[in-house]
Amino acid sequence: MANILMVDDSRISRRVLKDMLEKHGHVVVGEATNGQEAFDCYGKINPDIVTMDITMPVMDGIESLKLIHKGYPDSKVIMVTAAGQNEKIKEAIDNGAVEFVTKPLDEEKVISAIDKVLKK
Ligand SMILES: [Mg+2]
């Protein structure tokens, strides 16, 4: 079981992901709609895992990942990427992301990514 901060500007994406996570016993302890909010929220709730969308207004997922990873080196951020974002995936891994999953989200892949990160 993980306490998860979910970051995505799309309400539908958050709903889909939240349903998957909760179905498997995880708890969504916070939701943020952009990278700045995610960083601010992280310090307050100290989640086990962050799921981070990349394309968002105000501050994108890569910039937010950088801030979170710098401020909280033990943070575990899973990037949620869209097809064709290979460059971004590489940049995210280089900047401390621990895993990534691709949209459209596959329940099995999401849950196995979470389990993998929990074991690290
Ligand atoms: Mg987005």
Image (cartoon, helix red, strand yellow):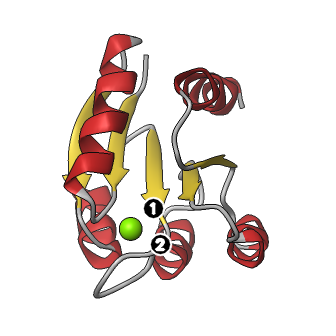
**Outermost residue toward the bottom in this view:** 58
Q: Quick one: quadrant of the N terminus?
A: top left
Q: Amino acid at mark 1?
A: Asp
Whichever of callouts 2 and 1 sits on the residue coming sooner in the sequence is 1
* Quarter of the view holding residue 39: bottom left
Measuring 66% from the left and 59% from the top, which residue is drawn there?
97
- Which residue lies under the disc numbered 2? 61
**Residue 16 against residue 65 in the figure, above or below:** above
Q: Give residue 95's position: percent from left, percent from top.
A: 70, 72
- Alpha carbons under labels 2 and 1: distance apart: 6 Å
Q: Give residue 91's position: percent from left, percent from top.
A: 73, 77
Is residue 46 something that shows in the picture? no
From the viewer's side, name the closer residue of 27 and 83: 83
Give the left or right position of residue 67, taking residue 30 as reference.
right
Q: Give residue 68's position: percent from left, percent from top.
A: 47, 68
**Residue 78 against residue 106 in the figure, above or below:** below
* Numbered label attached to residue 120: none
Mark 2 near mark 1, Cβ–Cβ under 8 Å?
yes
Measuring 72% from the left and 32% from the top, which residue is drawn there?
120
Q: Amino acid at mark 2?
A: Gly
- Which residue lies under the disc numbered 1? 53
Respond yes or no on whether mark 2 lies under 8 Å from ligand 1: yes
Neighbour class for label 1 at 10 Å: few (<14), some, many (≥20)? many
Q: Give residue 114's position: percent from left, percent from top.
A: 57, 29
Is label 2 in a helix, a strand or a loop? helix
Neighbour class for label 2 at 10 Å: few (<14), some, many (≥20)? many
**Residue 52 against residue 87 in the figure, above or below:** above
